[in-house]
């Protein structure tokens, strides 16, 4: 058993389950014990259910991509909601989180996630490019007022966190701006991305959200963008932040091709800034489609579209979205080096609780490639064989061949179970401790880790046994499980928001009060029961 949250690293012990919870065996009387079902999983590897903290599974982006690429379906990178839920379930995952939910589209996002079977879900609301916040910053509004606004938006949209994408850049794109650095002023409001990040990071921290501000940095995919990434870390001013799909933001501009790995620079910055965590956004070779709210950089990527078509959308004048099909090729220098950079980040960051396994589905690769990625991390010889097959100049310029580290099963459990549960504030998840949710995954202990993690021998999901060898579909076995949305409830002063509501109603497409999704609406109309996790009270900091 590998349960890092409980300090259990390869130990052998029994697990007792009653209803949907793991219980203490001492609480069971003799009569109940005599009728209990026993499942023998000796010589297997047990972990809690997997948690994916960044995967695009709701909100319309994938629907737009499906409409753009009807000839590509069905495929792993454009799955239906049913296929998404089934694929995650058969890898042993129990929860997944949509990282880019627009407030005015939150109902649709939650409805799509509620239609995804087997998974608990949650979402981060997108802020940092709407007129309301940019104008508040331009007018030097007090931090306390912005805190109330952020807290209200989190509650209204049933979110569990806040994300900022290319801070201020999506809105600046609509004014003709095609490039923004962290210190570039917005053409209309004059505020910089650094100001947006600093203010939102402070707000998220001060209203007590467990998950730090989820940051998509400026200059995604641009050679030399490591400077923007490091500037973003400084802009946070010591507040906790999570840098997402960091591989796409770890590029230098050295060498004859003016494109190089800057992974070591980010790793050094992480060592110097304990307030920062990352997920990688690993690319894998093959066809996919990139979907992003970062219209500024999706616009730049349209020239690389394969097949040659794309779509850019201004969503209700409050955000944006771009869908661009893309093919990563192992014989192409830049693609090969991107692949190597992601693995460098995984292997150079010593602490697996600060680096998370993602492919930014579907941007770097479909989430179904996780078992292959895990084998690359756990098997050095397999990794070096793969390195021999990429573009030789990329292999030569990468530090990957000199990295001997191989992830252990315990580190995989940290990165995919206990650490994301802690970072998201998910009480009772990511662990097999007494009182936690009974999500137990049983893997056959195979030397080929890709085959091992591709499909577990068995999964117990909220106390219900699912045996993948029985021939019964996961969809049928889990059809009666309730859908759950993980959310938080930060407090706010409603009396301070009247001016913000007036501003919102003047500039947005929806009246502010219409954004509010009640618990009853989420449960009865959308079809998902909210599970509310506690916030940390930091009112003294907010007042300061």
Image (tube, rainbow, N blue to C red):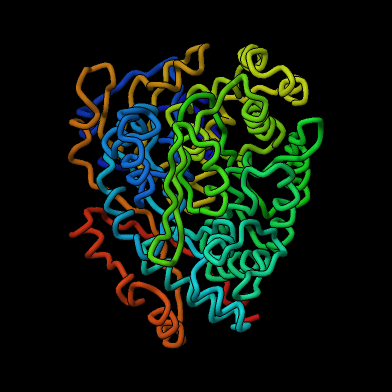
Asked whether 2 or 411 is in front, the reply is: 411
Residue 235: image location, x then y, percent? 71, 62
Counting from the top left corner in percent of width and height, residue 297 is at 57, 49
397 above or below 300?
above
> 107 or 351, which is in the foreground?
107
Please tell me which residue lies in front, 90 or 318.
318
Residue 264 in view, yes or no: yes
The residue nearer to you, when weighing 389 against 147, is: 389
* The quarter of the displayed image where residue 502 is located: bottom left
Of all residues shown, which one is farthest toward the right? 255
Q: Quadrant of residue 259?
A: top right
Q: Give left or right: position of 150 versus 190.
A: left
Residue 336 lies in quadrant: top right
Residue at 35%, 72% in the rendered image: 509
As drawn, is 148 to the left or to the right of 192?
Answer: left
484 to 262, vertically: above or below? below
* On screen, residue 236 above or below 327: below
Q: Residue 105: x and y, percent?
A: 34, 60
Residue at 77% over, 39% down: 253
Residue visible at 61% across and 62% down in the picture: 177
Residue 208 against residue 165 in the figure, above or below:
below
- In-image side of 221 versus 37 (left or right): right
Which image quarter is the C terminus in?
bottom right
Name the residue at 50% across, 60% down: 162
Residue 128 seen in the figure? no
* Label total for image: 0
Residue 210 point in image, percent of width and height:
52, 58
């Amino acid at each position: 058993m590998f349960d890092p949250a409980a300090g259990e690293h390869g130990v052998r012990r029994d697990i007792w389950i009653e209803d949907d919870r793991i219980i203490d065996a001492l609480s069971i009387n003799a009569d109940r014990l005599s009728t209990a079902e026993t499942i023998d999983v000796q010589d297997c590897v047990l972990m809690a259910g997997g948690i994916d903290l960044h995967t695009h599974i709701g909100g319309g982006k994938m629907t737009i991509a499906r409409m753009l690429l009807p000839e590509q379906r069905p495929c792993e990178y454009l799955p239906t909601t049913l296929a998404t839920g089934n694929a995650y379930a058969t890898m042993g995952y129990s929860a997944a989180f949509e990282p880019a939910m627009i407030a005015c589209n939150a109902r649709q996002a939650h409805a799509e996630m509620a239609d995804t079977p087997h998974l608990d879900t949650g979402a981060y609301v997108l802020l940092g490019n709407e007129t309301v916040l940019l104008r508040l910053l331009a007018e030097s509004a007090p931090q306390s007022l912005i805190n109330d606004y952020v807290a209200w938006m989190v509650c209204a949209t049933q979110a569990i966190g806040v994300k900022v994408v290319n801070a201020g850049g999506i809105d600046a794109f609509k004014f003709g701006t095609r490039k923004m650095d962290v210190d570039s002023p917005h053409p209309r409001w004059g505020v910089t991305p650094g100001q947006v990040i600093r203010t939102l990071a402070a707000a998220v921290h001060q209203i007590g959200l467990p998950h730090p501000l989820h940051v998509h940095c400026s200059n995604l995919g641009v050679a030399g963008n490591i400077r923007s990434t490091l500037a973003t870390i400084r802009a946070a001013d010591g507040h906790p932040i999570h840098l997402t799909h960091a591989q796409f933001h770890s590029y230098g501009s050295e060498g004859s091709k003016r494109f190089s790995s800057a992974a070591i620079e980010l790793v050094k910055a992480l060592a110097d800034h304990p307030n920062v965590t990352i997920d990688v956004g690993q690319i894998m070779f093959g066809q996919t489609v990139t979907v992003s709210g970062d219209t500024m950089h999706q616009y730049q990527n349209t020239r690389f579209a394969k097949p040659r078509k794309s779509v850019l959308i201004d969503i209700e004048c409050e955000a944006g979205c771009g869908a661009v099909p893309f093919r990563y090729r192992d014989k192409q220098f830049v693609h090969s080096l991107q692949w190597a950079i992601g693995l460098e980040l995984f292997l150079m960051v010593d602490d697996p609780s600060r680096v998370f396994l993602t492919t930014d589905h579907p941007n770097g690769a479909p989430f179904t490639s996780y078992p292959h990625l895990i084998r690359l991390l756990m098997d050095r010889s397999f990794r070096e064989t793969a390195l021999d097959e990429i573009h030789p100049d990329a292999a030569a310029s990468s530090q990957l061949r000199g990295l001997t580290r191989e992830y252990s099963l315990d580190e995989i459990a940290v990165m995919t179970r206990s650490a994301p549960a802690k970072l998201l504030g998910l009480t009772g998840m990511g662990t097999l401790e007494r009182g936690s949710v009974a999500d137990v995954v049983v893997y056959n202990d195979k030397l080929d880790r890709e085959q091992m993690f591709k499909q577990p021998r068995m999964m117990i999901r909220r106390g219900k046994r699912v045996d993948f060898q029985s021939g019964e579909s996961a969809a049928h076995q889990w059809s009666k499980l309730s859908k759950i949305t993980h959310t938080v409830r930060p407090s706010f002063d409603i009396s301070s928001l009247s001016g913000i509501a007036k501003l919102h109603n003047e500039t947005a497409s929806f009246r502010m009060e219409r954004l509010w999704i009640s618990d009853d609406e989420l449960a009865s109309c959308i079809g998902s029961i909210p599970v509310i996790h506690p916030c940390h009270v930091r009112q003294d900091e907010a007042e300061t």
